[in-house]
Amino acid sequence: MRAFAWVLVLVGASGCFSPMGNNSSATTEGGPGSASETEGMTSTSPTGTSTSTSTSGEPTTGPSATATATGLPTDATTAVMTDPSGGTTDATGMTGEPFCGDGVILEGVEQCDDGNQKDGDECLNNCALAVCGDGVLYEGVEQCDDGNLSEGDGCNAMCGQEGSPLTPRYVFVTSKKYTAAEVGKLELADLECEALAGAVGASPVLAGRNFKAWLSDSKEPAEQRIGKWLGEYVLPDGALVVVGSEGLLLGVLTNAIGLDEKGLTVPVEAESCQVGSEGVWTGTSTLGTAVDGQTCDDWSANSGLGVIGSFAAKDSAWTQCATRQCATPFRLYCVEVE
């Protein structure tokens, strides 16, 4: 009995008993596993790293022990951090390149970035600040913006409209057809346009106005003949064709030039202008200049080839659609000039 009691005393004095053996993370002070040796020790686990801390002289196992775990985020939120290169970095390490329109001003490159690709506000779609003379109308601020700071051209240096609004100019396609030799030369074509505009039965709105044919030869391009115009070009019935002479060159017509001097609609053929009997002599490219060698010997001969346009087109084909034999009769465009 005395031997058994002594064993019990020894067991009770040994501190904490672990059924797993001596795997305790801390023991009483003074032994090989004392708190002074184990304080700050770390152990790894599948979910992260745990750090055990204890007060000197107190066991670190049991309910009084504390553990701190660090590891990957456990929720679905992606952490986003600033990247020194100017992009953004998320928790996956992927970096997005900065671009105009992302809403973040890239210093040294962008003047502004309002997060959209819209022109007409204070920040253009190239991330430059809107200024008078940039050629883009700042809505609600500028009355006009013609791309320069000149006076006397309809839009002043403060991007205000000069004088009264510009009166529209008229454009039509002739009711008559002509071979190249019948056109004769540019001056004769111009006279034909004015004669038709002032003829009996012509739309009254055309009377007393000056017109030139949209024709080019080897000496004078059509765009130079009609001059620069910032106002509207309209049909005899008042329908808008395009705004400005630049709009004609760009081929962005709102309505095709399909009315004649009487205000009547010219019938459109089903055939393309490459093979059909309808078309308009122009000899003019989409740049408003002569197409080399395709002006029917400067509109004096029925031999050779000449460029025609389509009066049914609203794109660049209105002036350059096909090349046809000079002996084939086609119509003319007549454009009002100053």
Image: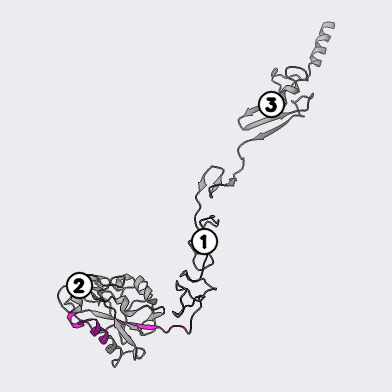
Mark 1 touches mark 2? (CB < 8 Å): no
Q: Position of residue 310 (x, y in %)?
A: 28, 74
Residue 239 is tagged as none
Please tell me which residue lies in front, 60 or 104.
104
Q: Which residue is mark 2?
A: 324
Q: First in sequence, mark 3 or 2: give its number.
A: 3
Please tell me which residue lies in front, 207 or 257.
207
Q: Position of residue 22 (x, y in %)?
A: 70, 18
User: Judging from the image, what secondary structure is the residue with disc 3 in?
Assistant: loop
Say whether residue 236 is left or right of residue 76.
Answer: left
- Circle 1: residue type: Asn
Mark 3 touches mark 2? (CB < 8 Å): no
User: Is residue 175 rendered magenta in the image?
Assistant: yes
Q: For the magenta stretch, what is the residue range?
A: 165-192
Say whether residue 232 is left or right of residue 219.
Answer: right
User: Marks 1 and 2, Cα distance to the nearest angstrom?
Assistant: 47 Å
